[in-house]
Image (cartoon, rainbow, N blue to C red):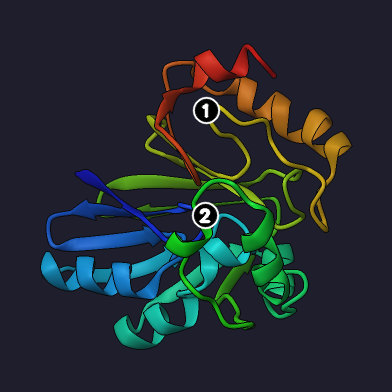
C-alpha cells in the first residue's frame, strides 16, 4: 500500500490517492487535472472517492473525476447538502478568498468557476467499509464545517481534511462551522485515537497525532 499526495493550486489543498496494487481510492478530488493525470500515469482503477468536507478547494473536481472514472463519491449527509449550494461550498466566494488569503500568491492560484456537485453515497455519524483487505472508518467531526469528516485507515493513518492541521488552528468561523461542537464532539474523539497515528491533513505537512492533540 502506498499513499500519493497531490497538491492543488487552490490554497495548496491536498488530494490523496491510496493505492493497493492497481486499485486506488481518492480523498478530496480538489483538482480534476491532477487526479486524472495521476490515475492514468499509474494505470490505476479508481474505485471510489471520499470527501472530507464540502469546501470548494477540496471538491472542485468531484463531478469531473466521477464522470471520467465512473466512481462513486462518498460524504456525510450534511456535506452532500452543502455541495449543492455554491454559497455553502464557497465557490461563489472563491475570488474574494483569493484576494485575502496568504497561502499562495494570487498569480499562482488556479481559477475556479462557481459550481455545485453532489455525493453518490452519504452517511450520518460514521461509516465503515472494507477495501482491498483494509478497513476505512469515516467519522463525522463537526467544527470546521457542518459536513466535515475524518477518515481512519487501518488504525494507522488519519486523513483529517481541514479538521486538524499541523501548524494551523482549526478554523471554525466559516458558514456551518461550530467551535462548541469541535470542542465537545471532535476533540474528545481525536484524543481517543492512538497517539502514534500518522495524520495526512487537507493542507500542510504530515504529522504525528499525539504531538498535535496535546495542544487541543
Numbered label attached to residue 166: 1
Residue 177 visible to the viewer: yes
Look at 70% across and 80% down and name the residue there.
84
Identify the residue at the far bottom of this view.
67
Rendering coords of residue 214 (x, y %)? 62, 11
Q: In terms of secondary structure, where does tag 2 sit? A: loop
Residue 164 in which image quadrant: top right
Q: Nearer the viewer, mark 1 or mark 2?
A: 2
Q: Quadrant of residue 82?
A: bottom right
Q: Is residue 50 visible?
A: no
* Image x and y of residue 42, in percent: 12, 64
Q: Quadrant for the N terminus, please.
A: top left
How far, Cα to Cα, is label 1 from label 2?
16 Å
Q: Give the answer, above or below, for where 147 lies relative to 66.
A: above
Q: Secondary structure at mark 1?
A: loop
In the picture, which quadrant includes the C terminus?
Answer: top right
Report which quarter residue 68 is drawn in: bottom left
Left of 214 or right of it: where is 67?
left
Choose between 50 and 106: the one closer to the eye.
106
210 relative to 125 in the view: left or right: left
* Other residues around mark 2 within 10 Å, as few (<14) / some (14–19) / many (≥20): many
Task: Estimate the x, y position of residue 71 in percent, counting from the top left.
Answer: 37, 78
Which residue is pictured at 30% across the width and 67% down the height? Answer: 34
Residue 189 in the image, given as x and y percentages of width and height: 67, 29
Left or right placement of residue 49 versus residue 86 in this view: left
- Horizontal side, residue 16 vs residue 214: left or right: left
Is 153 drawn above or below residue 16 in the view shown?
above
Q: Which residue is mark 2?
A: 11
Amino acid at each position: 500500500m502506498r499513499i500519493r499526495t497531490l497538491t492543488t493550486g487552490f490554497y495548496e489543498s491536498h488530494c490523496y490517492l491510496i493505492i493497493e496494487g492497481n486499485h486506488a481510492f481518492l480523498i478530496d478530488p480538489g483538482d480534476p487535472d491532477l487526479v486524472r493525470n495521476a490515475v492514468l500515469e499509474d494505470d490505476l482503477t479508481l474505485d471510489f472517492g471520499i470527501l472530507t468536507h464540502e469546501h470548494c478547494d477540496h471538491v472542485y473536481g468531484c463531478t469531473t473525476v466521477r464522470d471520467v472514472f465512473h466512481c462513486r463519491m462518498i460524504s456525510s449527509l450534511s456535506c452532500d447538502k452543502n455541495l449543492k449550494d455554491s454559497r455553502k461550498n464557497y465557490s461563489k466566494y472563491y475570488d474574494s478568498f483569493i484576494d485575502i488569503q496568504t497561502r499562495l500568491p494570487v498569480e499562482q492560484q488556479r481559477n475556479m468557476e462557481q459550481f455545485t456537485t453532489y455525493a453518490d453515497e452519504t452517511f450520518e455519524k460514521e461509516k465503515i467499509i472494507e477495501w482491498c483487505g483494509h478497513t476505512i472508518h469515516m467519522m463525522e467531526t463537526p467544527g470546521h464545517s457542518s459536513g466535515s469528516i475524518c477518515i481512519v485507515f487501518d488504525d494507522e493513518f488519519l486523513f483529517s481534511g481541514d479538521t486538524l492541521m499541523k501548524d494551523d488552528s482549526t478554523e471554525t468561523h466559516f458558514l456551518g462551522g461550530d467551535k462548541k461542537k469541535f470542542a465537545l464532539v471532535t476533540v474528545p474523539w481525536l484524543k481517543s485515537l492512538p497517539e502514534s497515528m500518522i495524520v495526512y491533513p487537507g493542507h500542510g505537512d504530515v504529522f504525528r497525532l499525539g504531538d498535535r492533540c496535546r495542544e487541543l
